[in-house]
């Protein structure tokens, strides 16, 4: 949904009931003022829209005509979710359709939101001479079950508009205090707690939808109980607003005005608004459009690195250890560069069509790099939504290998109290208090570790989109990746020693070249608790938790444009080749409002990372002394 469309609310309404009761003609009469005597049974689901005015508010009704035939019941059940109203329709001239009402009502209440408004509709009132269902009997049923009741005729339009208008009421108005109480119920893990988010002062119930969220359950839950307006806008295409509308349950009380004496809060709000304005301006100027020439160059040169590495291996792999080493380095570099390409496709920077985009993503992610796109997106989406938020951002949740902040140290050492594992205690006493000593060593294993995690995830879980075809495509591509590179290694290398060397050097090269970049992006920058993060504007959080790395052109190439990390996090769908142009626009805005904006050299950023590890290892040493 575009922000500029002229309606106040978008409501979903479902029409349910047996086949042949006139649901499709009710829909066409209300939305187009048409009636079709030759109307056929609906196949699956159809929908239409109409805007009406209620209490000086424009309501756009999105009306779903769900098939009544038994064979389509499984299809239609998913469409109940998110509906604010339902017309439960029977034919007054066919008692069998009225007998089915009880079953339809049970199914509706099993799948729909508990607050849904339901109206029992006796249709075809023009056939009163053939009436088989007494009006009083239907009224009593409606009263006993908490439903409103009306009789309609799609043929002569009797009560059709009234039936829809009565269920399209102005929504519930949530106060901030009410939302806080509901959020506390979630924190207290109450069984019936509702999970809500706020987007543009509208409240959405994601309790059921969270399992079907195309970006993954984990990322959506980070926004539960929060105002997710900016993060939603940055991480979704406009079409996602239509999907979100299915979860709409009411409006939210506007935020209280900021105290005029609170300069920090005023600056934060002003910074966020200026970044929003800049985003709109950049979008109009084409900064979110990818250059075809740039990506043809990137894809072709990246593939050339692989071709060069494998050609050297095939030509001299049986005779020359040096050739094997060079080939391993080039293949490792190729995998790293494929990682940046997969990253671009995962953010829809290159291609906006999701199906075509996913094809490129599984190609560069699963097939040639060996990482599952769903495993990576599940982690990475969450990282973008809750950057450097303790307990939410998976990129800083690396215990017991590395601890990046005092929250992680406290959580890990606190967990040892009830942990009898000798291994964890050994790590706590002899490894983590000295993590700066093995930091660079451990980075070499990053590629291997991620590849193993990726394979396990892919074969245990479906893709985030729940597509079985894409799930199997991911798994097959991962298998092909490992079979192909294993074959090249064994068939083209003359000794076991060199086979092992090729594997180690290629894995370590990718591990270092990926992990060092990732570490400089955010590690060593401020880490916040969820409560603290909830009080920080989304755009400010992205700015103060990121680190730009000042590089020459070669550095830009090696880092895949992620050295412009702040700009990337502010505008994740912006193609990387525009980020350097946007930095001179973003940095002055941050400085104008006293929002920390940090950039460093490669050496300076690495030193900051080591200083952070040293700070946390000293905390670990204190925890150990208390435990002994």
Image: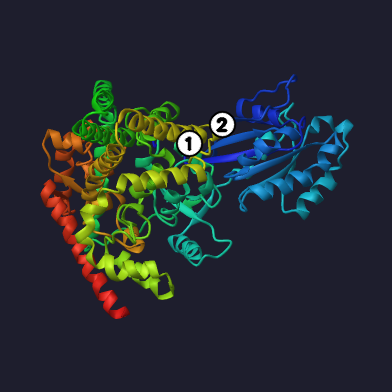
The quadrant in which the N terminus is found is top left
Residue most extreme to the top: 38
- Where residue 313 appears, as percent x and y from the top left, is 26, 28
Disc 1 crowd, CA 10 A, few/some/many (<14, 14-19, 20+): many
Callout in the foreground (2, 1): 1
Query: Above or below — where is 310 with respect to 573?
Result: above
Find residue 391 and name its label.
Answer: none
Query: Above or below — where is 283 with respect to 230?
Result: above
Instruction: Answer whether residue 191 is visible to the viewer in this image.
Output: yes
User: What residue is pinned by disc 2?
Assistant: 49
- Where residue 145 appears, as percent x and y from the top left, is 75, 53
Instruction: Answer whether residue 57 is visible to the viewer in this image.
Output: no
- Where residue 153 appears, as percent x and y from the top left, is 75, 31
Secondary structure at badge 2 equals strand
The quadrant in which the C terminus is found is bottom left
**Is 85 placed left or right of 627 in the picture?**
right
Residue shown at 39% from the left, 72% from the top:
416
Residue shown at 50% from the left, 56% from the top:
195
Residue shown at 62% from the left, 41% from the top:
78
Choose the circle earlier in sequence order: 2 or 1. Answer: 2
Q: Which colour scheme appears in the figure?
A: rainbow
Query: Above or below — where is 539 with respect to 152?
Result: below
For the image shown, how many numbered marks are present on the structure? 2
Q: Quadrant of residue 494?
A: top left
Given residues 242 and 467, the one toward you in this image is 467
Query: Above or below — where is 483 with respect to 300?
Result: below
User: What residue is pinned by disc 1?
Assistant: 475
Q: Quadrant of residue 46?
A: top right
């Amino acid at each position: 949904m575009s922000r500029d469309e002229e309606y106040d609310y978008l409501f979903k309404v479902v029409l349910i009931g047996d086949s042949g009761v006139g649901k499709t003609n009710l829909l066409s009469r209300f939305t187009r003022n048409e009636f079709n005597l030759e109307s056929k049974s609906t196949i699956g689901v159809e929908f239409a829209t109409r805007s009406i005015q209620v209490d000086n508010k424009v309501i756009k009704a999105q009306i779903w005509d769900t098939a009544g035939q038994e064979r389509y019941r499984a299809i239609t059940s998913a469409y109940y979710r998110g509906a604010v109203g339902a017309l439960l329709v029977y034919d007054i001239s066919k008692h069998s359709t009225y007998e089915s009402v009880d079953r339809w009502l049970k199914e509706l209440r099993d799948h729909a939101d508990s607050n849904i408004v339901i109206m029992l509709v006796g249709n075809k009132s023009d056939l009163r001479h053939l009436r088989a269902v007494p009006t009083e009997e239907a009224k009593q049923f409606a009263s006993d079950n908490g439903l409103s009741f009306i009789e309609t005729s799609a043929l002569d339009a009797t009560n059709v508009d009234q039936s829809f208008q009565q269920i399209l009421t102005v929504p519930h108005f949530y106060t901030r205090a009410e939302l806080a109480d509901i959020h506390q119920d979630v924190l207290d893990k109450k069984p019936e707690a509702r999970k809500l988010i706020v987007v543009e002062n509208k409240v959405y119930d994601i309790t059921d939808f969270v399992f079907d969220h195309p970006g993954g359950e984990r990322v959506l839950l980070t926004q539960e109980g929060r105002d997710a307006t900016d993060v939603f806008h940055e991480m979704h295409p406009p079409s996602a607003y239509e999907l979100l509308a299915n979860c709409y349950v009411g409006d939210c009380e506007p935020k209280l005005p900021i105290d005029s004496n609170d300069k920090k809060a005023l600056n934060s709000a002003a910074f966020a608004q200026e970044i929003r304005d800049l985003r709109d301006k950049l979008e109009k100027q084409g900064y979110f459009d990818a250059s075809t020439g740039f990506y043809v160059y990137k894809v072709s040169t990246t593939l050339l690195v692989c071709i060069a590495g494998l050609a050297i291996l095939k030509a001299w792999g049986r005779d020359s250890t040096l050739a094997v080493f060079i080939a391993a380095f080039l293949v490792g570099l190729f995998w790293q560069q494929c990682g940046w390409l997969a990253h671009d496709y995962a953010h829809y920077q290159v291609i906006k069509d999701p199906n075509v985009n996913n094809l490129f993503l599984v190609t560069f992610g699963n097939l040639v790099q060996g990482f599952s796109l769903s495993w990576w997106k599940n982690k990475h989406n969450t990282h973008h939504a809750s950057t450097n938020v303790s307990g939410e951002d998976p990129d800083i949740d690396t215990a017991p290998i590395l601890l990046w902040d005092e929250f992680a140290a406290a959580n890990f050492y606190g967990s040892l109290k009830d942990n009898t594992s000798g291994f964890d205690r050994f790590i706590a006493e002899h490894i983590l208090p000295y993590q700066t000593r093995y930091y660079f060593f451990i980075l070499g294993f990053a590629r291997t570790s991620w590849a193993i995690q990726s394979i396990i995830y892919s074969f245990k879980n479906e893709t985030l989109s729940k597509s079985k075809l894409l799930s199997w495509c991911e798994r097959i591509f991962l298998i092909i990746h490992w079979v192909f590179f294993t074959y090249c290694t064994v068939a083209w290398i003359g000794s076991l020693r060199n086979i092992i060397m090729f594997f180690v050097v290629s894995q370590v090269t990718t591990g270092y070249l990926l992990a060092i970049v990732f570490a400089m992006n955010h590690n060593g920058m401020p880490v916040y608790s969820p409560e603290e993060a909830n009080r920080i504007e989304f755009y400010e959080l992205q700015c103060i938790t990121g680190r730009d790395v000042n590089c020459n052109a070669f550095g830009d190439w090696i880092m895949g444009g992620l050295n412009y990390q702040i700009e990337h996090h502010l505008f994740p769908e912006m193609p990387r080749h525009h980020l350097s142009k946007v930095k001179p626009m973003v940095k002055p805005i941050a400085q104008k409002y006293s929002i920390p904006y940090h950039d460093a050299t490669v050496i300076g950023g690495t030193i900051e990372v080591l200083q952070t590890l040293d700070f946390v290892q000293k905390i670990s040493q204190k925890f150990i002394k208390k435990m002994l």
